[in-house]
Image: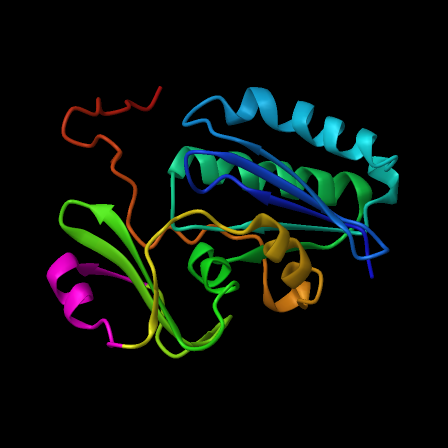
Amino acid sequence: MSITLAIDTAAPRLQLALLLDDGRVDVSVDEIATGHAELIFERIATLLARNSVAYSDLERVVTTTGPGSFTGLRIGLSAARGIGLARSIPVVGLSSLVALSLTAEGPVIVLLDARRDEAYFQMFAAPAQPTTPGELLPMVIAQAAVVPGVELVQSNVVDIAALARYGATLDPDHNPPEPNYIRDADAKPQTAARIERRNP
């Protein structure tokens, strides 16, 4: 089993997990809405040190890719990519909706409040086995699509230990660390007030 660092910054928290070569998983969780960038490498260093693991011992990094906080996702993805580049190790990205399905025991639906009367929605035949794509739906349509008797996940809290274990098994070539925003960013580039550039 490869030593794997898992990162989740998609929700208002900073979650880290370290999967060790003996199968044990140690986790670090901070409930924070902002400040991930200032804290993430300090928490990684603490997690590694208390397990007598160095950056050079890491064999893989896995991170959630969203949907979630735009700022949080960028920080987590940047940290994962940076460590992967510095250590020349694989970096795996996993949709947050898929990550949320990992603790289910059978068929599961993930339905997250995306605000604005909308929901992030995805259906799974079993953990990490999607039958529909992750999508943004009007809340009433998402709620109407819930199947009675099928497990429903509505919390955005990823089981970071489960993410580490599952991410350690994935093919990095088919699971790149690319953001999965689903909804476009709120900030749009300004065009109306842009000043025309004159050629010298």
Left/right placement of residue 138 relative to residue 164 reads: left
- Image quadrant occupied by the C terminus: top left
- Image quadrant occupied by the N terminus: bottom right
Image position, residue 187 (x, y; %)? 26, 34
Q: Is residue 136 magenta?
A: yes
Above or below, 121 against 180 in this view is below
Left/right placement of residue 120 relative to residue 126 reads: left
Colour basis: rainbow
Above or below, 109 against 181 in this view is below
Residue shown at 19%/65% (left/top)?
142
Image position, residue 8 (x, y; %)? 54, 43
Q: Please identify the quarter of the rendering in which residue 162 is found.
A: bottom right
Q: Nearer the viewer, residue 84 or 20?
A: 20
* Range shown magenta: 135-148
Left/right placement of residue 164 relative to residue 187 reads: right
Q: Is residue 16 magenta?
A: no
